[in-house]
Image (spheres, rainbow, N blue to C red):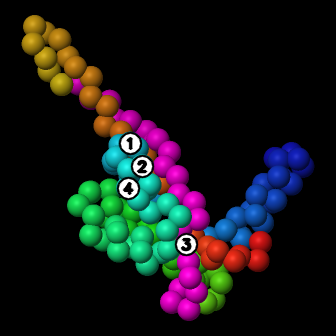
Amino acid sequence: MGARKHNTAEARKEAQKTLYFAKLMNCPTSPRKMRLVADMIRGKEVNLALGALKFSTKEASRKLYTLLKSAISNWEQKTGKKADEETLYVTNIYVDGGGSLKRLRTAPQGRGYRIRKRSNHVTVFVDTKNSEN
């Protein structure tokens, strides 16, 4: 690896140390459905977001619930504080499209209809409002 790439990679690693996040890769839900649930918790306080996800009837909310709990524990691990003592917020959440499984469904007159089974990648960032950064 060249010196320029090495330096930018090191700078990126240092910047990641101050961020508190969790990622969910290749979740077998369409990104459109996951974004509906992600919009429910964006910018909310963590306990309110966990409550909203826990009692939501959508399938994607179960996966986001565990992901948010993972992000909270990552914050606790990096800062050494308890989440109960601080007021954490979902500062940023985004859903990116993942890979698609391509399938064929038989159709009349010898044709086939294409089915795309979509997946997504979700990233959740948590932090306090009055962060020192």
Residue found at x 67% / y 68%:
19
Q: Nearer the viewer, residue 28 or 31?
A: 31
In the current view of this chain or complex, which residue is farthest to the left?
A: 108
Range drawn in magenta: 82-104
Tag of residue 89 = 3
Relative side of 95 to 126, left or right: left
**Answer yes or no: do the residues labelled 2 and 1 have beta carbons within 8 Å?**
yes
Q: Earlier in the sequence, mark 4 or mark 3?
A: 4
Residue found at x 9% / y 13%:
108
Q: Earlier in the sequence, mark 3 or mark 2?
A: 2
Residue found at x 48% / y 54%:
122
Q: How far separated are the C-alphas under marks 4 and 1?
A: 9 Å
* Mark 2, residue position: 35
Label 3: element kind: strand
Q: Tell me the kind of residue under disc 3.
A: Tyr
Q: Earlier in the sequence, mark 1 or mark 3?
A: 1
Q: How far separated are the C-alphas under marks 2 and 1?
A: 5 Å
How many other residues sit within 10 Å of disc 3, few (<14), some (14-19) or many (≥20)? Answer: many
Q: How far separated are the C-alphas under marks 2 and 4?
A: 5 Å
In the current view of this chain or complex, which residue is farthest to the top?
A: 109
Q: How far separated are the C-alphas under marks 1 and 3?
A: 23 Å
- The answer to whether residue 26 shows anywhere in this view is no
From this view, report whether residue 24 is shown above or below residue 102.
below
Provide the major secondary structure of the magenta segment.
Answer: strand
Residue found at x 50% / y 74%:
45
* Mark 1, residue position: 32
Relative side of 132 to 99, left or right: right
